Image (cartoon, rainbow, N blue to C red):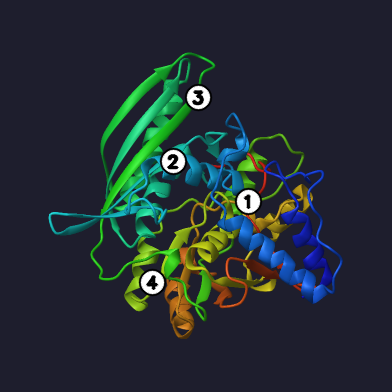
Amino acid sequence: MSKSWIDEALAQTEQGPDGLAAEGRRQLPLAEPGDREQQVLDRIDRARRRRPKVREERITMSHGAGGKATQTLIEAVFLDAFRNPLLEPLEDAASLTVGGARLALTTDSYVVSPLFFPGGDIGDLAVNGTVNDLAVSGARPLYLSAGFILEEGFPIADLQRVTESMRAAAERAGVHVVTGDTKVVQKGKADGCYINTAGVGVIERDGALGVARAQPGDAIIVSGPIGDHGITIMLARGELDIEADVCSDTAPLNGLIAGLLDVVPTTRAMRDATRGGVATILNEMAKAADVGVMVSEDDIPVRPEVRGASELLGIDPLYVACEGRLVAVVAGDSADRAVDALRAHPLGEQAAVIGHVTDEQPGIVRLKPAFGGTRIVDLLVGDPLPRIC
């Protein structure tokens, strides 16, 4: 390990809940690089095994950013209140058995700003996001609900544009919107239009999927270039003097996933890389399976426009949301077949193996940068990105 990796990790472990260095906290004693590295890993492990606790007195924007604050909120408040075996895996959808049938159930809410952006809008985002949460759980998506929270003064023409987009997206995905609800709030109490969805699908294949099933030697695959959606949303808000020819990657992944599972039915896990990006998924997997993760920067597909915009904004594409990309974990000897299956579908033409699961440093995600050495890829701290879904 390089000394820069150790120093960075030391800084991370000395952060408080707001991401700032905690004054007066005990410093690690000086030691050789190898000893210091182990001290860092031991401290990270102890911190992650502590019972999560929300330290803030009020909700902040960071609680919705998909990083450490979000994870703590989910585990310390929602999971603590609703704990049961169906919820505890914290996968994208719950797996249920009803009358002998295996079903998947998911829900999501969409508060993206702006509502309309290059490549899509809040309507097709709501349908695609819900379809994808079902599909990565191994289900065939069937039915959706749609709840609308509308702000007084919202243009009817915009609402019709959103619902037409939802209709077209549902048709492409082969699902139906079968129930819904509408609420109107006073002007200034919402941001035009919010959409809540729920989705139901049937699990027709044997076996189960989940990031906790990852094993050392497994390959980690992404289905295409990452970061397109998040960068598109940031630029579409018009607050940055940056121009780039990028569009959201929002798309339904159920067809792509069906093709993968036909070829590699033993796929361990899948997640769609939305809020928090690929980095968040990798951290969730490392924690849930108690494994290490090593990924290579050179192998991660990123469009030049997205990489350039990310560098100008000072952000890492690994943390930027996608809405039409998945992360898959398969046995190492199935990696080539999995990549070929993904590349056979238009949405997976640039699929690539980006790393592997290891038995070294469980719970830690490491990245091999292009310039050498390794560094920790941790969960996000704070709220560095705007609302993207």
The dot on residue 318 is none
Instruction: Please say whether residue 252 is visible from this viewpoint.
Output: yes
Q: Amino acid at mark 4?
A: Leu
The residue where tag 3 is placed is: 192
Q: Which of 86 and 163 lies nearest the eye of the viewer?
A: 86
Foreground label between 1 and 3: 3
The residue singled out by tag 4 in the image is 260
Q: Nearer the viewer, residue 269 or 297?
A: 269
Q: Residue furthest left?
A: 99
Measured Cα–Cα span from mark 4 to mark 3: 38 Å
User: Is 259 left, or right, of 379 in this rendering?
Assistant: left
Tag 3's secondary structure? loop
Residue 345 visible to an observer of this rendering = no
* 2 or 3: tag closer to the N-terminus: 2
Q: CA distance from mark 1 to mark 3?
A: 25 Å
Give the residue displayed 43% in from the left and 43% down from the top. 80
Marks 1 and 3, the one that precedes in the sequence: 3
Disc 4 vs disc 3: Cβ atoms closer than 8 Å? no
Residue at the spot of label 2: 78
The 10 Å Cα crowd at callout 3, few under 14, some 14 to 19, many 20 or more, is many
Residue at the disc numbered 1:
246
18 up-or-down from 279: above or below: above
Q: Residue 171, image x and y in percent?
A: 31, 48
Front position among marks 4 and 1 = 4
Q: CA distance from mark 2 to mark 1?
A: 36 Å
Identify whether 218 is placed above or below 61.
below
